[in-house]
Image (cartoon, rainbow, N blue to C red):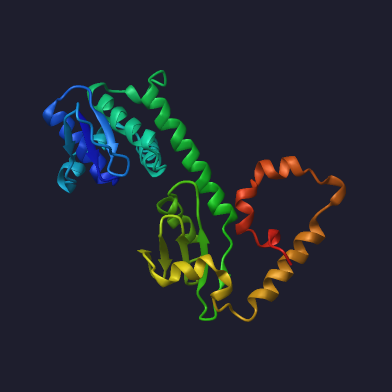
Amino acid sequence: MIYVFDQSLEGLLTAIFEWFERKPGAVRLCSTLHYQPDAFSETLFIHTDSEKAGRVWKGLQQRLSKEWLRKLYCCFLSEQEEAFVAFFNCCCILFKQQGAEQNYGDPFVLTVAKLARSVEREKHRMEAFIRFEKAEDGLFYCGIDPDFNVIPLIAGHFTQRYADQRWVIYDIKRNYGIYYDLRQTTEIFLENGLQLLQQKEKVQQDEKEKLYANLWKDYFKSTNIQSRKNTKLHVRHVPKRYWKYLTEKQPE
């Protein structure tokens, strides 16, 4: 049997609930994005139910530590098809066997742990490498396109660190972001704003933004010791795909 869900966390948790309720045996989980009809397999389209999803999540909370709940969540945020399959099967195992999350010999448990680690690494890099630019109206903004959906994980960090200014972090790849208005951080979806973030020259920048950028580049150059330059080590810690976020890496 094929279980097809809508790629949401609630949809995935609902699929787990349906599996335990129906007990169909082995199933193949598939998101709507990758589903292809199979004439030889029965298909169940999962209708997302927040109540059923809530019951499953509450059950996981009772069985798992906060560390492992976060691993499951991070695994889901990787948005990979193998992550959804691992999440689903891992949770089914956890409900049948207490302490199964410690069995790293299980391929699903191991996949969840590996993908969670990759997402956490991307989260930390986004927190370190994001550079805001100031618009004419005083709003600080930054467009990003991370490998994984880390917006939910970085919201708290930036809310605490930049609590005295209005800012927007927008995920261009997934077309949504977060906005802080000096009181709270909310999720936003932009239409025209997406093109503006993709084409920075169309954004009306604050008149001092260019000056600050040049000052930072000068500071970076003055502290750089050419004789101790180690490009391989530098790229290992700051991969080239993140250079587009760094002011000091932009052309003059």
Viewed as shown, does residue 83 lie left or right of 54? right
* Residue located at (42% from left, 42% from top): 78
| Quadrant location of the C terminus in the rendered image | bottom right
**Figure check: 58 above or below 21:** below
Pick the residue in front: 40 or 125. Answer: 40
Q: Residue furthest front?
A: 39
* Residue located at (58% from left, 77% from top): 205
Residue 218 coordinates in the image, percent (x, y): 77, 66
Viewed as shown, does residue 130 lie left or right of 43? right
Viewed as shown, does residue 149 lie left or right of 124? left
The image quadrant of residue 23 is top left
* Residue located at (54% from left, 80% from top): 136
Residue 201 can be seen in this image: yes
The image quadrant of residue 38 is top left
Viewed as shown, does residue 233 lie left or right of 100? right
Pick the residue in front: 31 or 176. Answer: 31
**Figure check: 108 above or below 11:** above
* Residue located at (38% from left, 26% from top): 109
Residue 58 can be seen in this image: no
Q: Residue furthest right?
A: 227
Number of numbered discs: 0
Residue 34 coordinates in the image, percent (x, y): 32, 40
Pick the residue in front: 237 or 30. Answer: 30
